[in-house]
Image: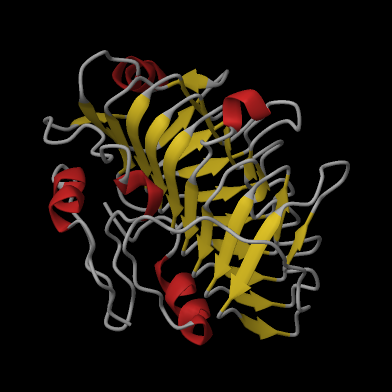
Amino acid sequence: MSRKISRALLAATALAATAIVAPTANAASFNLEGWATQCGGTTGGGSASPVTVSTTAAFISAVQSTSASVVRVSGTITLSSMTKVASNKTIIGVGSGATIAGHGLNISKVSNVIVRNLNFRDWRDDGIQVETSTRVWVDHNTLRNGYDGAIDVKRGSDCVTVSWNKISSHDKTMLLGHSDDNGSQDRGKLRVSYHHNWFDGTNQRHPRVRFGNPVHVYNNYYGGVTSYGVASTEEAGVLVEGNYFENTKDPFHRGEGSSDPANLVARNNHMVNSGSGDQGGSVKSIPYSYALDSASGVKSIVTGGAGTGKVG
């Protein structure tokens, strides 16, 4: 299904430095949308001349440069620790095989970062960690077989979009807000959009939310999630909209572990051999324009478009 392109000028700027593979007919747009269009927008390295890196040393030097940069990753980069990423960066894989292994990326106390088209595997901490950062877009990555969080957003981060990623063979998938005791930093922030992600037999946290309101979870495909899909806790407000849940006994609920239940509104979701979920309360209005794909078509759209090799 075609999608309305909101904030077209901003999206064009954000994508100017990368070649985009056009979606097939009846597939959703790959343009930037959601919370990362807010707070001034997310353009990453913008129109900076791309630099291609194929060694660990060159990769670390490029992503930690103080200048706006478009970093193209070729081959496999093996990291020995979580690697800090500086502001104003686009990090994008070449082809479908570009890989970050061993450890992940730490997007900490920065702004305006884009991470696209990379495989993350065998990380020993988080695959992608976003903390105390704003205007971040994590898009079209494939993540599998890591130790802790695949894509975690925490410590007052804000205006983040997580889109078109495929996550498989993993337990703790996407955490939003790291502690019940961090409300003083997190209230009014942790506003994230999760859309068109493919959760392929993963276990929990798709996402698990504290404090963020509104958090927008839409047009994702949950295929055989084993523990639970979405959890809203600790004053959060989560809109779960237009998703496709298949073989997922607990698609969404309020409260998790020792965390208090919070607000969750579910609408227009498609259930196949899945539970009905638990919802209640109210969620703040979504401030950006967007167009939903029909929930019944989300499985085919997402499985055809998520992960690496679709943008380059």
Q: Position of residue 94 (x, y in %)?
A: 30, 45
120 versus 248 height, above or below = above
Nearer to the camera, 177 or 170? 177
- The answer to which quarter of the image holds residue 129 is top right
| Residue found at the very far right of the displayed protein | 258
Q: Position of residue 125 (x, y in %)?
A: 66, 28
Nearer to the camera, 15 or 266? 266
- Residue shown at 11% from the left, 31% from the top: 49
Q: Is residue 97 visible?
A: no
- The answer to which quarter of the image holds residue 212 is top right
Q: In the image, is 124 to the left or to the right of 37?
A: right
Colour convention of the picture: secondary structure
Q: In the image, is 102 to the left or to the right of 24?
A: right
Q: Position of residue 300 (x, y in %)?
A: 47, 80
- Residue shown at 21% from the left, 17% from the top: 67
Nearer to the camera, 229 or 156? 156
